[in-house]
Image (tube, rainbow, N blue to C red):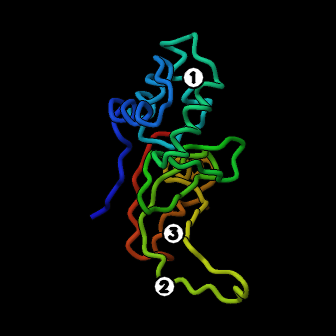
Amino acid sequence: ATIIDAMRSPAELTTMFRQRGLRITPQRVAVFEALHERPDHPSAESVFQAVSADMPSISLRTVYQTLNDLTEMGEIRRLDLGGDAARFDPNTGDHHHLVCDECGRITDAYFDVDGIELGGLTGFTPLATKVVVTGVCDDCALAGSAADPSRTSTTSTTTTTFTNIQATPEESP
């Protein structure tokens, strides 16, 4: 069974912020709520867009500060996956990521990396392994295969490379 460490509720985050002496504002609570409702790995800009639709007075700076505070508290993870904006992951459990090169979708993936041999690491002690697999998601592969019949999904390549892969699909960014 896949274990997903879900983000705490907005009420729990509010309590945690207060316990740490951090100011609670309606804008911060709105960011908590926006994150709690999202199954994806949003950028600060996409959180800002979602919150500002109902709260036009919120600033992008407030969104960034709230996301940074949540990251420092270990409630979310900041992901730098080579795109033009950092993304934030509310799933803090052990997992890896599948990144679509076409649409940018990021999907949580669960597979065992304990057997990976890392040779030639003189003077370096690995503490953790985070795997990012890039390719083309099924939706983009299907859309592309209509235009180019030689194009197929990379899912089979990924699942034959890693055993017991489990992906948690999400909406496009």
Q: Quadrant of the C terminus?
A: top right
**Residue at 62% of width from left, 30% of height from top?**
45
Residue 49 disc label: 1
**Residue at 44% of width from left, 53% of height from top?**
92
In this image, 125 relative to 1: left or right? right
**Residue at 48% of width from left, 19% of height from top?**
25
Residue 169 disc label: none
Q: Quadrant of the N terminus?
A: bottom left
166, above or below 122, in the image? above
Mark 3 belongs to which amino acid? Answer: Thr
Cα gap from disc 2 to disc 3, whole angstroms: 16 Å
Dot 3 or dot 1: first in sequence order is 1
33, above or below 126, in the image? above
Q: Nearer the viewer, residue 23 or 98?
A: 23
Mark 1 belongs to which amino acid? Answer: Gln
7, above or below 127, in the image? above
